[in-house]
Amino acid sequence: MTKIFFLFSIIIIIFLQSPPKIQSQTIPRNISIFILAGQSNMAGRGGVYNDTATNTTVWDGVIPQECRSNPSIFRLTAKLKWEIAKEPLHVDIDVNKTNGIGPGMSFADRLFYRFGHVGLVPCSIGGTKLSQWQKGEYLYEDTVRRAKAAVASSGGGSYRGILWYQGESDTVDMVDASVYKKRLVKFFTDLRSDLDQPNLPIIQVALATGAGPYVDAVRKAQLKTDLKNVYCVDAMGLPLEPDGLHLTTSSQVRLGQMIAQSFADNIPNSAQSLYMPLLITSFCCSLSIIFLEILAPTLPFL
């Protein structure tokens, strides 16, 4: 009987450690929605390289463990349908470019335990300037459309945050760089307003590099927006692809984890919730040990 109880305890522990399983066509009503917006490094260029034989850019197809599909992580397709998320997340969004690994999946991999189910809404387009993301412009309006469709089609999902990584294109022109902060504040404020979420958390990424000479000016604006619930993760120093502009696959995995940690550190109760499964597992282990070592020997039927 003692061995049977021990095996039963192990089964419970394994069950608690396993992510919840759901059918790919079933969207949980309590799904937590994150919007992924920006340009190429948010869309994902990890593992993308130039094939000299064909003179085209291709993705190497390598998917790190942290970016593997998970039945608790969804993405909204270009046709506004939910599906189990898989890399590349922006394959049908940033359609004019070759997409690879971005930070979205490794971010969700760190947070799905906290929420149960995570819904990613890819909206990023490579090579875009911040002026193209202003209210009234196509990229802005399409992001709002997709975000609202994500909530409506989930039957009760809710916005949890915006992940924003953009600015490389604004380092080319001095005027774009000088007004970057003003445009960024307006973009964040308008987007929150149109989503009826005035304090929606935003985690943005400070540039690792840029396409022009004004990287420092853009980074300065990103590192201090002076807006409530807007936090910045610095990508400076993360390894780049040979093009010197895009993050490598390993850098993208690390960046997603950094964004998740920033969310956990800054959003109330998130840090504690990230470790809740481990706490539950430890508690169950302790109960099993107490029963086996103290209570079981006193029971006559064991």
Image: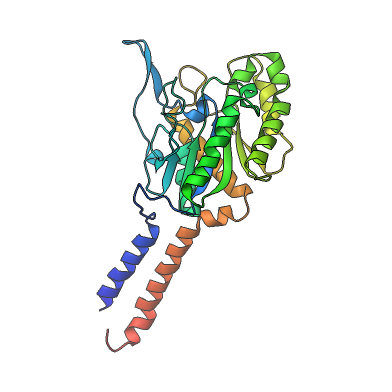
Depicted 111 relative to depicted 171: above or below: below
Image coords of residue 177 (percent x, y): 69, 19
221 or 283: which is nearer to us?
221
Residue 168: horizontal and vertical position, in percent? 59, 21
Residue, x 48% and y 31% (percent of image)?
A: 251
Q: How many marks?
A: 0
Compared across the picture, whether 96 is left or right of 60 comes to right
Quadrant where the N terminus is found in the figure? bottom left
Residue 242 is drawn in which quadrant? top left
Asked if residue 21 shows in the view, the reply is: yes
Q: Residue at x 55, y 35 (%)?
A: 145
For the C terminus, give its image quadrant.
bottom left
User: Residue at the location (35% across, 47% down)?
Assistant: 24
| Residue 274 on image: x %, y % | 51, 53
Q: Tell which of 174 and 35 is nearer to you.
A: 35
Q: Quadrant of residue 290?
A: bottom left
Name of the residue lying farthest toward the bottom: 300
The answer to whether residue 236 of the structure is visible from this angle is no
Residue 302 in the figure: left or right of residue 236: left
Q: Quadrant of residue 54?
A: top left
Residue 119 pos. (x, y %): 47, 44
The colouring scheme, among rainbow, by chain, secondary structure or one colour, is: rainbow
Looking at the picture, tell me which residue is in the foreground, 214 or 295. 214
